[in-house]
């Protein structure tokens, strides 16, 4: 059983030659991406194809961006991922449609055994992370291995998400916990008690979904 196979099947593995080659090529191509001009979508999507990132329509990842191997990342439509994010995809990372990810956020599927003797063998693991549809992760969020975040949920900036978070809630903190449910009448507000103006509110109520890139 190779270490690549072990890694890709959620088993403990060692970063031997096979996994290290995967890390090298992902970092090699992302280095080229991170040195290019921003919003260079043809180049961005080509490099994602080369390293195996799967994505839907209208996906934008601002640079710099880091990933471990690339091929374990699967993204839906209309992602906007702000600058400085890291996807440690030793395990699978699945991201739904219409997800916003704030700057310097890390999705980390990787980890090591807690006991020092087990850890010093150099065994590690990758356990999947799943992000639902319409999720917003604020700036500097850290999502740890094995976490699922439900649809329509907002994770407050700086949170450390150590366990599953349900759908339709605002969750914050370290460790991240549910603060409150999201109510339908909040649709009329864009920030705290500030309401949308009539022009913007009409777009919201009509279900408009404008994209920066068509």
Image: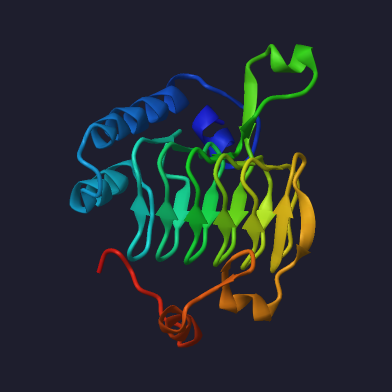
Q: Residue at x 51, y 75 (%)?
A: 196
- Please, which colouring scheme is shown? rainbow
The image quarter containing residue 111 is top right
**Of residues 57 and 142, the one drawn nearer to the viewer in this rendering:** 142
Name which residue lies at 41% across and 56% down. Answer: 80
Count up the numbered dots.
0
Q: Is residue 210 above or below residue 213?
A: below
User: Quadrant where the N terminus lies?
Assistant: top right
Please indicate, yes or no, whether residue 2 appears anywhere in the rendered image.
no
Residue 15 lies left or right of residue 184; in this view the side is left
Residue at 40% x, 30% y is 22
Residue 137 appears in the figure: yes
Residue 141, picture quadrant: top right
Q: Quadrant of the C terminus?
A: bottom left
Say above or below: 208 vs 177: below
**Nearer to me, 167 or 127:** 167
Q: Position of residue 94 (x, y in %)?
A: 53, 54
Residue 80 shown left or right of residue 114 in the figure: left
In the displayed structure image, the side of residue 183 where residue 105 appears, left or right: left
* Residue 51 percent location from the top left of the image: 33, 41
Image vertical order of residue 159 relative to residue 20, above or below:
below
- The spot of residue 56 in percent (x, y) is 37, 63
Relative side of 19 to 191, left or right: left
| x 74%, y 42%: residue | 162
**Where in the figure is residue 206, as x and y percent of width and height?**
45, 88
Residue 57: image quadrant is bottom left
């Amino acid at each position: 059983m190779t270490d690549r196979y072990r890694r890709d099947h959620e088993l403990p593995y060692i970063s031997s030659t096979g996994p290290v080659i995967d890390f090298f090529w992902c970092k090699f191509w992302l280095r080229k991406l991170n040195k290019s001009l921003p919003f260079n979508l043809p180049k961005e999507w080509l490099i994602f194809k080369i390293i195996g990132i799967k994505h839907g329509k209208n996906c934008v990842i601002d640079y710099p961006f880091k990933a471990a191997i690339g091929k374990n990342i699967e993204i839906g439509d209309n992602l906007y991922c702000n600058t400085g994010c890291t996807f440690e995809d030793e395990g699978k990372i699945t991201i739904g449609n219409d997800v916003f990810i704030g700057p310097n956020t890390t999705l980390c599927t990787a980890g090591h055994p807690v006991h020092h003797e087990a850890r010093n063998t150099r065994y590690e693991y990758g356990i999947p992370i799943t992000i639902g549809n319409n999720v917003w992760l604020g700036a500097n969020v850290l999502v740890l291995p094995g976490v699922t975040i439900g649809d329509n949920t907002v994770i407050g900036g700086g949170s450390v998400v150590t366990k599953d978070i349900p759908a339709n809630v605002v969750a914050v903190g370290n460790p991240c916990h549910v603060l409150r449910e999201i109510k339908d009448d909040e649709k009329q507000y864009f920030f705290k008690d500030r309401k949308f103006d009539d022009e913007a509110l009409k777009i919201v109520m009509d279900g408009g979904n404008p994209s920066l890139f068509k």
